[in-house]
Amino acid sequence: MILFILNSLLLGAGLAMDAFSVSVANGLMEPRMSRRKMFLIAGCYAGFQFAMPLAGWLFVRTIVSVFSAFENWIPYIALALLLYIGGTMLYEGLRGGGAGETKPLTASALIVQGIATSIDALSAGFTIASYHAGMAVFCAVLIAAVTFAICMGGLMAGKKFGAHLSGRAQVLGGVILIGIGLEIFIKGMVL
């Protein structure tokens, strides 16, 4: 049981790295973000990190052939979503000259970020496919808890540095999101 918990926590930490980076970018964009909004953002990412491995687990247990075909598209989907969000942020930051107030994160952008940063967690469903339902849910809960904690740290770090970067935060946030998209894509193409 201890090994199962340790493996689940490590899996959660690995899966949460993209969400951590996006959390830092969000903190950079909104250095005056309220604690309530921070909990909402981290909770959204944790929710997606909870749901995606379970969806992968369910697909593997029921319709493996459909999921196998979809798995090849995961790097492309993540790249497209993050290029769009990051590119928009970069464009707006450069267009505005890097000065002034940045736009707060919208609910739709948060959902797209949540999907983009957790879509690779669908593949984690393959790694937990041998678990019975209770173990799979417990593993997903641990992944979500780790993601929540890591994202809160990322948001706090981003807020701290965002206050010092002022208007350049939007450009930096856009570059970070584009970089994450490229990293997911390259990793998906190589592995």
Image (spheres, helix red, strand yellow):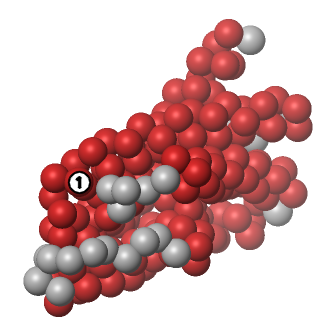
Residue 172 to residue 32: above or below:
below
Does any portion of residue 21 appear in the rendered image? no
Q: Which residue is mark 1?
A: 163
Percent coordinates x, y for residue 183 in the rendering: 31, 59
Using the rendered view, name the quadrant where residue 118 is placed: bottom right
Name the residue: 31% across, 74% down: 102
Circle count: 1
Q: Is residue 80 left or right of residue 126?
A: left
Residue 71 in view of the camera: yes
Between 98 and 72, the one nearer to me in the picture: 98
Q: Secondary structure at mark 1?
A: helix
Q: Give the farthest residue toward the left.
A: 97
Query: Callout 1, which amino acid?
Result: Ala
Q: Residue at x 41, y 37 (%)?
A: 153
> Relative to 2, is 102 on the left or the right?
left
**Mark 1 neighbour density, 10 Å: few (under 14) some (14–19) many (20 or more):** some
